[in-house]
Amino acid sequence: MEATYQAPEGFLTMAQAQNALGVSKATLQRLVRDTRFTVYRDYRDRRVRLLRVEDVARLKTPIPE
């Protein structure tokens, strides 16, 4: 396996999602919990938590008040 982890196509690691959204780890964990997105694990490395790209994109979209 490569020295750096490569997420499967269509998924982002939690760290990649943090960078994409510009939020902290704690904030991302709260957003995921509050929105009830499914968090996935990769069988190649069970320590890695993954989010679907579509779910991260939805978090970037403003919501009406």
Image: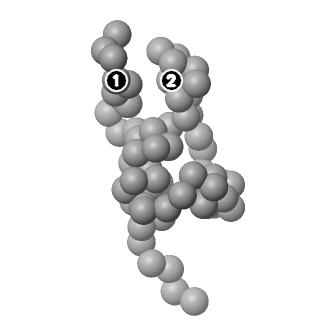
The type of residue carrying mark 1 is Thr
Rendered image quadrant of residue 21: bottom left
Residue 12 at x, y = what percent? Answer: 41, 41
Indicate the secondary structure of the residue bearing disc 1. loop
Give above or below for 50 relative to 47: below
- Quadrant (top left, top right, bottom left, bottom right) of the N terminus: top left
Whether residue 48 can be seen here: yes
Give the label on residue 4, or none. 1
Query: Disc 2 marks which residue?
Result: 42
In the image, 45 versus 54, the foreground residue is 45
Which labelled disc corresponds to residue 64?
none
User: Does residue 15 lie above or below 32 as drawn?
Assistant: above
Report the side of 14 relative to 16 (left or right).
Answer: right
Earlier-in-chain disc, 2 versus 1: 1
Q: Position of residue 64 (x, y in %)?
A: 52, 86
Which residue reaches farthest bottom? 65
Binning the other alpha carbons within 10 Å of mark 1 as few (below 14), some (14 to 19) or many (20 upward) gives few
Mark 2–mark 1 Cα distance, whole angstroms, equals 14 Å
* Secondary structure type for disc 2: strand
Q: Residue at position x 42%, y 72% from top?
A: 61
Image coords of residue 46 (percent x, y): 57, 20
Q: Residue at x 38, y 25 (%)?
A: 5
